[in-house]
Amino acid sequence: MKRVECPEPVEGLYWIYILLMRNGMFYVGQTQNVASRMQRHSDGTGSRQAMQLKEFVLVCVEGPMEADIVTKRERQLKKWTRAKKLRAD
């Protein structure tokens, strides 16, 4: 999968992102500032999974979108199969 760049924040809007962890698992999350969130993941303060693995690649970013939409989309992506996430780029 290709690494993607962090988009610039947009006031009041959110982004969905997918990380490919070093163990091959995916992590799906949402944030208003993707670059800041990636830094927190790198520092080990972003999530328990990222804290344990610390190595990841940002492989997908969607947005910007409103808060109610981003939550629904995050839930939807978390239900996707691994194969579908691999095609998300």
Image (spheres, rainbow, N blue to C red):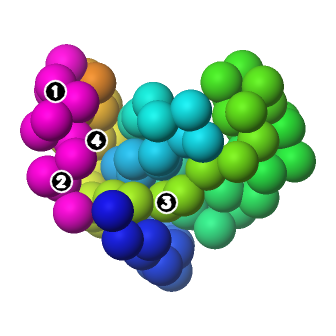
- Between disc 2 and disc 1, whose residue precedes? 1
Q: Pinpoint residue 56: horizontal percent, then vertical percent.
A: 61, 50
The three-letter code of the residue at mark 3 reads: Leu
Q: CA distance from mark 1 to mark 3?
A: 17 Å
Marks 1 and 4: CB-CB under 8 Å? no
Tell me the residue that label 3 is attached to. 58
Q: Residues within 10 Å of mark 3 (few under 14, many from 20)?
A: many
Q: Please give the name of the residue rendered at 51% of the width and 74% of the height, measured from the top-left corner.
A: 6
The stretch drawn in magenta includes residue 8: no
Nearer the camera: disc 3 or disc 4: 3
Magenta segment = 79-89
- Amino acid tagged 2: Ala
The reply to whether callout 2 and callout 1 are in contact (CB within 8 Å) is yes
Q: Amino acid type of disc 1?
A: Trp
Residue at x 60%, y 42% (from the top left corner): 22
Residue for badge 4: 70
Q: Quadrant of residue 79?
A: top left
Determine whether the residue tagged by mark 1 lies in a helix, strand or loop.
loop
Asked which quadrant contains residue 72, the reply is top left
Crowdedness near tag 2: few (<14), some (14–19) or many (≥20) residues, C-alpha within 10 Å: few
Q: Is residue 56 left or right of residue 45?
A: left
Instruction: Return the mark for residue 80.
Output: 1
Residue lying at the far right in this picture: please name it: 43
Give whichever of discs 3 and 2 has the lower sequence position.
Answer: 3
Q: Decide: marks 3, 2 in contact (CB < 8 A)?
A: no
